[in-house]
Image (tube, rainbow, N blue to C red):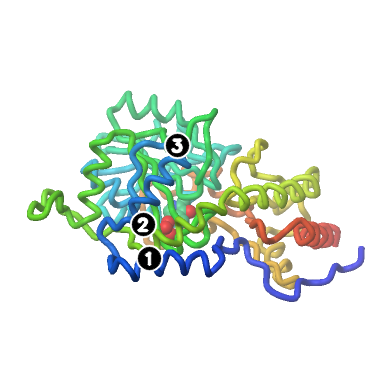
């Protein structure tokens, strides 16, 4: 087939959701009028309440990033020893574990959901295990019932990394309401963003109160420092962006759903190429495919390199898997023999451009390019 024309400008995997600058400026003028920049400001309170309603979760606490959210969650439960987690995640998950003085223990993933395999979790358990930290990777829900069962049986904390799972539900219940806590990231690359930011949803009111103290240097009132906290607050400029963006999320979700429909219909049934997204299409954070290096006639890495020639910058999230990062490679659980599924998946995944403003015409063009590459 004829070589399709390249895009004139680079097309990245996401484009950050941004409000009209006038809408943001109106909120910024409020901040100037009030002269209050951080420390539980009115806009952070307003956003906390609005997100709590939108995401249907009762005990939400806004923080400065997803990474901080993880660290605050670990400290809120005073975890020690080992925590069992997945290698197929952002280094943020594993780095946060390590920054809290905990040892990550990797368990393999399920070949379909790509989330941590409960059987592997049970096998990774040891006398020093204090928590399980599963990740709703690409917004795909973990096996929450099985994981809760394991956690309950051993009195372990269950701390979900839901950084990629904004707005995802499990049979009508917010994904944030499973486990002891679930964290979110509002980084610029996420479906809902505040440039930098994050949140923790806690099952218990008491845990939210601990987290609220921990994120404010441990202060619980004017003169009482009750806990060794850090600065994990969300400031007013950031909260303003969140408030302006929240009104745009529904439109962004439907825009992404249209793009995903094009990808799903055009890419289905191609030999060696499989679509990772769950069929109900709830994971609108990323559109993820797998390239079977043998069956496709082109390696995953070459596929990505050749897409760049068309100005399409697909990403290999998450390659390398975290167990192959140099400073984690020597952990006993990092042996690829122990992580066969994750080792393979990390060599096959490709995240395609997926955002509302991409539009269906561009999505079709990207599919033309993929047709061309797989044909050649
Ligand atoms: C983005 C992300 C994080 C980190 O969030 P930040 O807000 O960038 O600190 C953690 N875990 C996963 C799975 C992520 O995708």
Drawn side of residue 306 relative to residue 56, left or right? right
**If you read the primary sequence from the N terminus, does the residue marked by circle 2 or circle 3 appear first?**
2
Instruction: Tell me: residue 239, above or below residue 84.
Output: below
> Foreground: 208 or 9?
208
Would you name the residue on which mark 3 appears?
56
Drawn side of residue 309 relative to residue 242, left or right? right
Which of labels 1 and 2 is toward the front? Answer: 1
**If you read the primary sequence from the N terminus, does the residue marked by circle 1 or circle 2 appear first?**
1
Residue 18 bears which disc, if any?
A: none
Q: How far apart are marks 1 and 2 (CA)?
A: 10 Å
| Residue 308 point in image, percent of width and height | 70, 70
Please count the marks in the image: 3
| Label 3: element kind | loop
**If you read the primary sequence from the N terminus, does the residue marked by circle 1 or circle 3 appear first?**
1
Say whether marks 1 and 3 touch (CB < 8 Å): no
| Label 1: element kind | helix
């Amino acid at each position: 087939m004829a070589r399709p024309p390249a895009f004139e400008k680079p097309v990245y995997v996401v484009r950050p959701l941004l409000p009209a600058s006038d809408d943001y400026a109106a909120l910024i003028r409020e901040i100037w009028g009030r002269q209050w920049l951080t420390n539980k400001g009115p806009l952070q309170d307003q956003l906390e309440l609005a997100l709590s309603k939108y995401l249907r979760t009762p005990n939400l606490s806004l923080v400065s990033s997803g990474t901080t959210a993880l660290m605050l969650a670990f400290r809120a439960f005073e975890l020690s020893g080992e925590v069992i987690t997945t290698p197929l995640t952002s280094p943020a998950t594993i780095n946060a574990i390590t920054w809290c003085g905990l040892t990550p223990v990797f368990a393999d993933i399920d070949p379909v959901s790509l989330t941590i395999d409960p059987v592997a979790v049970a096998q990774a358990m040891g006398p020093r295990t204090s928590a399980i930290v599963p990740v709703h990777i690409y917004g795909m829900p973990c096996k929450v019932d099985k994981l809760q069962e394991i956690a309950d049986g051993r009195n372990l904390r269950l701390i979900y990394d839901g950084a990629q799972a904004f707005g995802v539900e499990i049979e009508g219940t917010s994904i944030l309401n499973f486990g002891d806590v679930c964290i979110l990231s509002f980084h610029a690359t996420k479906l809902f963003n505040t440039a930098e930011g994050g949140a923790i949803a806690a099952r218990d009111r008491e845990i939210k109160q601990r987290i609220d103290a921990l994120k404010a240097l441990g202060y619980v009132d004017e003169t009482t420092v009750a806990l060794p906290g850090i600065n994990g607050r969300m400031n007013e400029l950031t909260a303003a962006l969140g408030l302006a963006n929240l009104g745009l999320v529904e439109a962004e979700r439907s825009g992404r759903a249209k793009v995903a429909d094009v990808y799903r219909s055009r890419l289905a049934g191609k030999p060696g190429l499989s679509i990772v997204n769950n069929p109900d299409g709830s994971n609108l954070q990323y559109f993820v495919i797998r390239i079977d290096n043998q069956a496709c006639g082109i390696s995953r890495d070459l596929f990505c390199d050749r897409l760049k020639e068309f100005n399409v910058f697909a990403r290999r999230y998450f390659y390398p898997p975290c167990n192959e990062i140099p400073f984690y490679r020597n952990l006993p659980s990092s042996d690829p023999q122990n992580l066969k599924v994750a080792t393979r998946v990390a060599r096959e995944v490709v995240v395609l451009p997926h955002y509302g403003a991409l539009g269906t015409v561009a999505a079709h063009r990207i599919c033309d390019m993929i047709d061309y590459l797989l044909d050649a």
